[in-house]
Image (tube, rainbow, N blue to C red):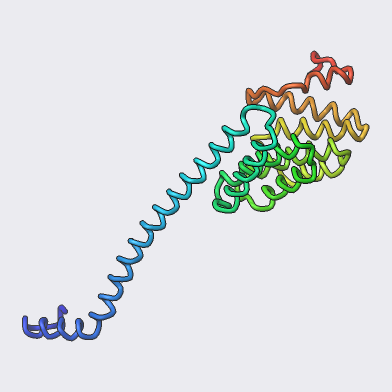
């Protein structure tokens, strides 16, 4: 517009520009406004979904916190797990519900269902810590089922450093189940050292070492 000499020329240029571009400009503004509205609506929906998932998960925790469950409570708990995972499958609450489901299955003596629940968490979660926690629990189940080699492979698939002490503990259990006592001893020693580094309580490991004749003074 710097080249235009008069106000009339400027006005004519503005009119021509508006005629050529006004429709697309209005459309662009409308689309942008719709986008903002849509984003806000989506955010509100997501917040409502998260709140609903949180409430359902809290129900599940309250229901399963009292120790052994009767048949009716167990059925209700499993239904809550299904509801949370079906309706809120991408949330942290769905991952945690599957972990609870695995624990309930173990309590019922259904090792296969417990493995399925844990493998479901491992396969679907995008959260490294939760995935590592599921792998730890799966590895423990595999050791208990006599599949210690599979347990070692599960641990090797990836457990985050935040769970390093527990990882070493379960690795020691797997080695011990395989009769590899020296490796079990080293793994349990590592577990105690890692737990001390992070100031984490780790129960039972010292007893395992004592049963192997380990002298704590040599740690």
Vertical placement of residue 95 versus 185, above or below: below
Single out the residue that lies furthest toward the right: 179
Horizontal side of 177 relative to 197 (left or right) equals right
Q: Nearer the viewer, residue 89 or 11?
A: 89
Q: Where residue 114 appears, x then y in whole percent?
A: 74, 43
Q: Nearer the viewer, residue 179 or 7?
A: 179
Single out the residue that lies furthest toward the front: 72
Tell me what residue is drawn at x 53 percent, y 42 percent.
56
Q: Where residue 2 appears, x then y in whole percent?
A: 15, 78
Q: Where residue 35 appears, x then y in whole percent?
A: 35, 65
Residue 153: quarter of image: top right
Q: Nearer the viewer, residue 48 or 198?
A: 48
Q: Nearer the viewer, residue 197 or 89?
A: 89
Q: How many marks?
A: 0
**The N terminus lies in quadrant:** bottom left
Horizontal side of 11 relative to 194 (left or right) equals left
Single out the residue that lies furthest toward the top: 217
**The C terminus lies in quadrant:** top right
Q: Where residue 215 appears, x then y in whole percent?
A: 84, 15
Single out the residue that lies furthest toward the left: 7
């Amino acid at each position: 517009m710097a080249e235009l000499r008069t106000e009339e020329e400027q006005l004519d240029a503005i009119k021509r520009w508006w005629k050529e571009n006004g429709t697309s400009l209005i459309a662009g503004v409308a689309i942008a406004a719709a986008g903002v509205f849509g984003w806000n609506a989506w955010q509100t929906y997501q917040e409502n979904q998260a709140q609903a998932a949180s409430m359902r998960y809290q129900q599940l925790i309250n229901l399963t916190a009292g120790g052994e469950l009767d048949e009716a409570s167990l059925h209700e708990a499993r239904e809550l797990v299904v509801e949370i995972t079906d309706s809120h499958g991408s949330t942290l609450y769905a991952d945690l519900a599957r972990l609870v489901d695995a624990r309930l299955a173990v309590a019922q003596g259904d090792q296969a269902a417990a493995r399925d629940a844990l493998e479901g968490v491992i396969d679907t979660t995008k959260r490294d810590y939760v995935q590592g926690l599921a792998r730890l629990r799966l590895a423990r189940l595999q050791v208990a089922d006599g599949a210690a080699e599979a347990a070692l492979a599960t641990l090797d698939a990836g457990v985050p450093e935040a769970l390093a002490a527990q990882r070493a503990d379960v690795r020691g259990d797997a080695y011990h189940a395989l009769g590899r006592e020296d490796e079990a001893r080293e793994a349990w020693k590592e577990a105690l050292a890692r737990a001390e580094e992070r100031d984490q309580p780790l129960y039972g490991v010292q007893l395992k070492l004592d049963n192997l004749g380990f002298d704590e003074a040599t740690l």
